[in-house]
Image: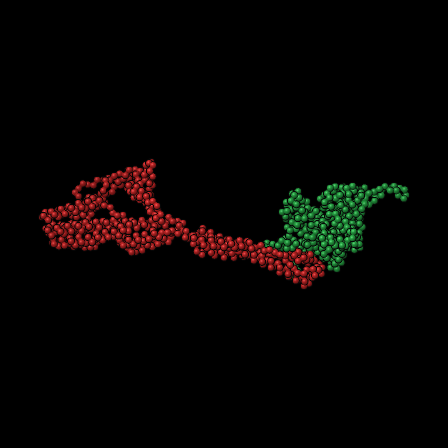
Amino acid sequence: MTAGTLQPEPGDGRAEAPLPSPEVIEPIAARVRGIVDALDRALLGQHEVHELVVVGVLSQGHVLLEGMPGLGKTQMIHSLAQLLGLDFGRVQFTPDLMPSDIVGSSILQTSSDGRREMEFRPGPVFTNLLLADEINRASPKTQSALLEAMQEHRVTVLGQTRPLPEPFFVLASQNPVETEGTYPLPEAQLDRFLFKLEIRMPDAAVLEEIVQTRRRGQPPVLDALVDASSLADTFAVLEQVVLPPAVARYIAALVRGTHPDAESAPDLVQRMVRYGASPRAAIAFGEAARARALLAGRPSVGFEDVRTVAHPILAHRVILTHEARFERVTPASVVDAVLERIPTAPGALPRSAKLVEGAVT
Amino acid sequence: MGEDHDAVLHSIRSIARRLTIRDAAIRGVLWGGVGLLAGATAVLAARLGLGLGGHEVLWLLPVGGAGGAIIGVVVAWRARVRPETLVPLLDDASSAGGLLMSSGSRGASAWRGGSIAALMLPRIRWAWWRPVATLATASAVSLVAAIANPALHEQDRSIDLSAHIEAMHADIEALEQAEVVDSEEAETLESELEGIDSRADATNPSAAWEALDELSRQMEARATMAAAEFAETSEAAEALAEASMEAAEAAEQLTPESATSLAEALAQAGADAKPLAEDAGVQEAVESLAQAADAGDPQAVAEALEQLSQAASRCSGGASDRLATLTRAGLGNSPGQRGSNSARDKALAELKAMLDDAKQGKPIDAKKLAMCAGQCMNPGVSRGPGAAKLAWRDEPTSWEDAAFRPEAIESQDPDLDGSALLGTSLVDPGEQQPGAVSAGDGLVADTSASSTAAVAQVLPKHRDAVRRYFTRSDQVDPAPLDDATSQAGEEGAAP
């Protein structure tokens, strides 16, 4: 180590990639924060959800919203589509909904020259932002059709594959209480959602404000803040956000810590978790943390960014045991245990020093 | 990078240095405590196991503590906090959002100034109070035990020999007073006694007791021998005094020849009496008597005999006093009724009869008078005149063959002048039966298969220990001593 600089060592937590300048980051960050602010004005009392939804969009991931009816899930997604200036499609999932109702179908048409040929009628999935309302009410067959589109960003009908427009996001919602006649999403399909966000009941003050400002529930009219090209610019800047190796190591340790066979796993995980998060979760962590850093106006990812997106990423990817259900252990508590157990900088302190619980988080 | 970057680097290094110093201090205390505990344990082991006392091994304590502290500091230095590994923690605690971790990246300088307000360490708990307190307590306990133990140890290991030592001091004083030992020998015995007392140790108490017993046996042997000499001297002197007094009363009435014979006989008897050989007064009186005998004057013989009688009386009194001194001190076996008293009385009576005859004018048989006078001084059985060689057989093949070959002494007239007294016995000689227990070797055991308690043989060197056992102060019932002694006495071998 010389007098003027800290020489990087393998895994010392410092990145060598160039940082984007504030002139690059700050306009984009201001624009993204503007989207969040607009969402806050459209749907009161859900700021954290709005931030995470925007982070999900910036991460080009799909988001599953779960909450009681009437909390504004659909309204929030509709407002987001307005703000992003993207094509918006909505599908109300029902048990009799067929895959072709989503991805589209080919029908026999007579052309102007009198010939008959099969013509493809695209389904609602051919859009930039798709609202899959009450996705758990559709049959698994229909869910699978949508989930293929989510993963592949393309659909195949009658042997012909058609790409979906970019960007493509699915914002799905589901009702956690009406379980009769529903088809819960399998774990493998849940894994394809970047986030699973819980929409919580706003407090009394927010409700009072809603009563005073929302006549007949009409939201304010929102203008588009971005378009497709500016959104592409945002994605380009997002690519420049630096993920330090120490943060990447922390993400890996968090994901590994959700597995019961991991040495670093907390006791709760070892007892109550059957399967941990997949590597796709680690990828989602990196992307979401970058987006979170950009939203905060920073060129690099910090540990707090990872902790912010930990619950939405991990909670629906951790599969608990039956014992956990009996003991009322929730995925959120498991994630809390993992966050508490995994240190951000292992080995940084002497052995005789211990971090006070909650000193950093 | 600029000045901001240098300031951040300086802060990081300063924090790392502070953490390392504090960790080194904690580890130094911890390892020092461990070393102190190890030293205290070593001291304890040395004092208990090796018997080392005083402050001989207390140097282990500071050496152990200092050595442990040095080891702790070295270990802490080898595991010192690296600024590179500290960066992520500082970044997280300072809410730097990864900027601190990206300080090596190009373009970082544009972000640092406004993004990192101040480097902050997270709240840290130094886990050292509990182990340090535990080790300090353990070390203190061990230290106290190590220091306090020798006193307890010595106290527990001491033997109370004071009563025995005091009794032996009195015995030595009695021996010196009875002139059994001179002052130089008495000092030697005293120093030997003090040495035994100083070396007494409870870990091996039998050594002290055996040493005391041995010294006591030596003193008892000296006292017994001296008591026998005193008794013999006293009796011989008393007999000489009585015979001289009888002779003095009769000398004036004797003829000069008879007076001369009487004086020569008593002078010879006094000169030959071994117990009186060292008494200057007696020997001087004997010489005066011999001169008076040469002069042939009955008056002078009578006076010389009176002087001899007085000198012999003084000699007898002195021997009796020394014997009484030993007897009061419990030293020396009191001489029993000597078997020769009857012979002496008989000789005295015969001497008186010869003197009475001489008074009436009868001539004195000089040889018989000399024999009677000798019997008064040295009563007993004469081996008779002459000598026989000890003849050994060839290599003995049995105990019977190992016995002396009897050889008869030639029968001849007794020549009392050439005879010597070898010993006396009151019993007839007898043959010791095989298997019989030697009466002088210990208590005689009841070897019969009766239901009575058997009395085991006790070696001479253990007799004092057995006696102490039965005469100890906390003995409730002294009956076993009485029983044992009476039974042993009945068997003819006192313990």
- Please identify the quadrant where the N terminus of chain A is shown: bottom right
Q: Position of residue A50 (x, y in %)?
A: 74, 53
The residue depicted at 41 percent of the width and 53 percent of the height is B154
Measured as percent of width and height from the top left, residue B122 is found at 63, 56
Rendered view: B84 above or below A145: below
Name, please, the residue furthest toward the bottom: B3
Q: Quadrant of the C terminus of chain A?
A: bottom right
User: In the figure, is residue A91 to the left or right of B176?
Assistant: right
- In this rendering, would A30 be left or right of A320? right
Return the residue nearer the eye: A63 or B391.
Answer: A63
User: What residue occupies the far top of the structure in this picture?
Assistant: B449
Residue drawn at (50%, 57%) of the image = B62
Give B60 or B410, whichever is nearer the viewer: B60
Q: What residue appears at the point 73 percent right and 52 percent down from the top-left corner?
A: A207
B110 or A291, nearer to the observer: A291
**Can you give x and y, in whole percent of width and height, for residue A240 in the image?**
73, 55
Q: Which chain is green?
A: A
Q: Chain coloured red: which letter?
A: B
Furthest-right residue in this view: A113
Furthest residue in direction left, as rendered: B361
Q: Is residue B223 visible?
A: no
User: How is this picture coloured?
Assistant: by chain
- Tell me if residue B160 can be seen: yes
Q: Which of the pair A293/B253 is nearer the observer?
A: A293
**Residue A347 appears at what percent x and percent y?**
62, 53
**Apparent side of residue A268 relative to residue B198 in the rendered image (left or right):** right
Residue at figure coordinates x 72%, y 45% from the top left: A176
Q: Quadrant of residue B73?
A: bottom right
Indicate left or right for B146 with B179 as reference: right
